[in-house]
Image: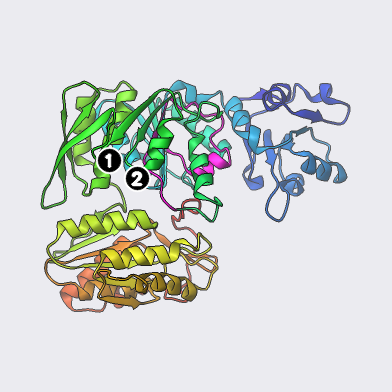
Amino acid sequence: MAETLTRIAETAGAVIHAPGGAEVCGDVEVSGVDLVSDRLNEGDLFAALPGTHTHGAVFAAETPAAAILTDAAGAGILREAGETRPVLEVADVRAVLGDVAAELYGHPSRGFTVIGVTGTSGKTTVSYLVEAGLMAAGAKVGLIGTTGTRIDGRKIPTSLTTPEAPTLQALFRRMADEGVTHLVMEVSSHALALRRVLGVDFDVAGFTNLSQDHLDFHPTMEDYFQAKALLFDPASPMSAHRAVVCVDDDWGARMAGLCPDTLTVATHGQAGDVTVGEVTAAADGSQDFELTISDAAPRGVHLPLPGAFNVANASLAIALAERCGVDLDRFIAGLGGVSVPGRMQRVDRGQDFIAVVDYAHKPGALAEVLDTLDHQVDGRVAVVLGAGGERDHSKRPLMGAEAAKGADLVVVTDDNPRDEDPAPIRAAVVEGARGVTGGRATEIREIGSRREAIRAAVAWARPGDAVIVAGKGHETGQLVRGVTHPFDDREELAAALEARADGTRADETRADAPDAAGSADAPDAADVKENDR
């Protein structure tokens, strides 16, 4: 699709600067927009934003763009460079980029039902549950989230939990052209704060919970909450028409008061529009419960996922479907076979104890998964964990503390150290673990190599125990000193289990894994979601 610069300027509230006057270039058409200079095609609009060190406008000359959208500082750089293409100047590029992209791609999100899911924990699981239920109910579904993008179950390459506005709107256009009827997408606090979802027509928004995370990006928990609230507050240009909010925590109760058309979900005995009856858990971790929505008769739900938090996730997913007018019987039936990559994902190689990989990389989530495992086994629990580099430092000792409270063996290792020295990161986690008084842990170990840490936990386990490798979940790489080394906790855990079974050394089967110093060499191509981690 294409739009004239005059129309784009009207949408953005921009002033057009061009040789010979704005009226000369008003009929010039642009057919796409991007803020990454090397992704632009001829006839596109380059969105030149200020960066941490360099303004994007300095790269304009290298692009084949037909015109440039930028701010006053960028316009000044372009003037000094003698730029001859039309320049659209606005006060804040991010404040208009979503609307501009939506206009260029024909507002595709208006053509299908858009369900946005936000919160600290559970976004991915809720999205997978909604996708599975909708497909069972006969919908053609698009999914955008931490584990990637899918159209009708088919994986589409993308990066970031919530892509930048131009990529997002281009994806919507593709989905609309392929006949998608419903889209479920994770909406991160970064995406809301950076206004990536401006121009998205959200039909329903869902809120899971809020706990400490991303305080490297948000200065306070209140700022973190206010970013999430942009999806619910009617005064926000990004707010949804209707909302479903889990009120199991105080943040949820507060969020529910923002949107006038809200369905509340309560799974801990509080008052709510959607409530959960008695939950029965099987030995394999699957659960059955009754869900009551308003005055309707209770519905039985079978959920193949363990943990009270997944009962809350499933209840939220079903309530979102109800808000969309979906056949709930078919939707609920579709939840029976769902699995979520790296979320309480069991790895079984015939061992006589439970081995699990989970994405838990914040204190609250770690506490929940440890509690879930404790209720599943009669034996002991071991946890392998670390903390990400160049992220919220205050979270590190809290992760260690939760591990010491909920596990018998705590093995502290490297997560994604990025450009930080991993040793001080591990030290902070260990300090938090050792600082717990009256905790459960009887042994705390520090092993820098993540592979060796996993192997140590597996070697420690006895029949009836549980081992959980936490923090990276579905990720297939470990980011060390600017290089993403291939590393998948699920593969490494499986290799350790197989090595234990046949008596070989696990490191002989996975020689390509990075050690504590990140000495292995591999292409920077793994799936590590930077805005989430």
Q: Position of residue 313 (x, y in %)?
A: 29, 40
**In the image, residue 191 lies in the stretch drawn in magenta:** yes
Quadrant in which residue 351 is drawn = bottom left
Q: Secondary structure at mark 2?
A: loop
Residue type, numbered disc 2: Gly
Q: Position of residue 146 (x, y in %)?
A: 42, 47
Instruction: Kindly identify the residue that appears in the image at 52 percent across and 35 percent down.
Output: 230
Which mark is in front, 1 or 2?
1
Q: Read off the magenta span.
A: 186-212
Identify whether 463 is placed above or below 182: below
Mark yes or no: residue 474 visible.
no
Identify whether 264 is placed above or below 526: above
Q: Is residue 281 left or right of residue 31?
A: left
Dot 2 crowding, Cα within 10 Å, few <14, some 14–19, many 20+: many
User: For mark 1, what is the residue?
Assistant: 312
Q: Considering depth in this image, is 364 or 50 the residue closer to the camera?
A: 364
Mark yes or no: residue 345 visible.
yes
Q: Is residue 41 left or right of residue 337?
A: right
User: For mark 2, what is the residue?
Assistant: 122
Q: Is residue 43 left or right of residue 137?
A: right
Q: Considering depth in this image, is 481 or 284 the residue closer to the camera?
A: 284
Identify whether 416 is placed above or below 87: below
Q: Considering depth in this image, is 118 or 349 the residue closer to the camera?
A: 118
Quick one: quadrant of the N terminus? top right
Mark carried by residue 15:
none
Residue type, numbered disc 1: Ala
Q: Position of residue 153 (x, y in %)?
A: 33, 38
